[in-house]
Image (spheres, rainbow, N blue to C red):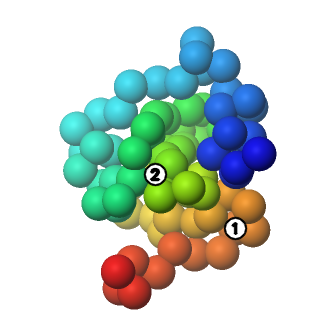
Amino acid sequence: MSSWDIILDNFTPAQQLDLTEPEQDYLPVYATDAFAADYDDFCCIFACFLTPGIWCKEVGTPWKFTSNNKELVTRKF
């Protein structure tokens, strides 16, 4: 099971919020299937990045892999 599948298992469709325009603009170019959700007192953004899941607390914060919380370094792409 991929980390993206685990995210989908943890957030029901009713908990998955539509992204605002700024949130949509903040998605990495390779991200797909994104949504926002209330988590830990933040409206976090979750997205599928190629295969693994990624997340960030809000627009302007670093993207991290859900599997290990390591930062996604976009300059490598």
Residue drawn where x is 46% and y is 51% of the image: 58
* Marks 1 & 2, CB-CB < 8 Å contact: no
Circle nearer the viewer, 1 or 2: 1
The residue at which mark 2 appears reads as: 58
Mark 2 closeness class: few <14, some 14–19, many ≥20 residues within 10 Å:
some
Q: Earlier in the sequence, mark 1 or mark 2?
A: 2
Q: Is residue 39 visible?
A: yes
Q: CA distance from mark 1 to mark 2?
A: 15 Å
Between 58 and 66, the one lying in front of the other is 66
Between 53 and 44, the one lying in front of the other is 53
Q: Secondary structure at mark 2?
A: loop
Query: Residue 70 location, x and y as percent?
Result: 66, 75
Query: Residue 59 location, x and y as percent?
Result: 38, 54
Residue drawn where x is 58% and y is 17% of the image: 13
Between 36 and 5, the one lying in front of the other is 5
The residue at which mark 1 appears reads as: 69
The C terminus appears in which quarter of the rendering? bottom left
Query: Residue 68 location, x and y as percent?
Result: 75, 68
As drawn, 71 above or below 6: below
Query: Residue 38 location, x and y as percent?
Result: 60, 32
